[in-house]
Image: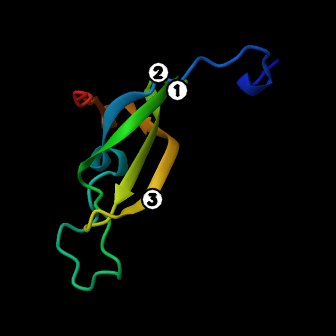
Amino acid sequence: MYKPWSSSVSTPPPPLDRPVWVHLDRLYGPPDSPGPIADPVPGGLLVATTRVPGLLKRWARAVDGRWFGRVNFAVCDAYGAVVAEHLAVLVPASALTPRDEEPRR
């Protein structure tokens, strides 16, 4: 009988809170049209082909053996304004790389 994790009596492990880079082009795939947009939308265009800082909370494994990270990260527009903040999003491990923490002063 299947018993979901949320119904178990054990407490989940603490979050990892590891800094990572989320490669948006690997997560979202290549652009549909390689040319520039002639009529941009008000407020700026999303930047979806770069890497953004994220925080890896947990690892999860798929039944086919692939690994996914549960990651918090934000997507910004061309002006740097946060357009969407993503919390606990499943991101394929292939779209994640470690990010060195900045030295403390």
Q: Residues within 10 Å of mark 1 (few under 14, many from 20)?
A: few
Q: Farthest residue to the left: give it.
A: 35
Real-space Cα separation, disc 3 to disc 1, in angstroms? 26 Å
Q: Earlier in the sequence, mark 3 or mark 1?
A: 1
- Residue that label 1 marks: 62
Report the residue at 18% width, 74% height from top: 36
Q: Give the quarter of the image for residue 68.
A: top left
Q: Amino acid at mark 3?
A: Ala
Q: Is residue 26 above or below residue 66?
A: below
Question: How far apart are the two marked residues, 3 and 2, measured between alpha carbons?
Answer: 29 Å
Instruction: Report the disc number at residue 52.
Output: none
Q: Which residue is mark 2?
A: 65
Can you identify the residue that label 3 sits on?
84
Which dot, 3 or 1, sits closer to the camera?
A: 3
Name the residue located 28 percent from the left edge and 81 percent from the top edge.
40
Q: Nearer the viewer, residue 26 or 41?
A: 41
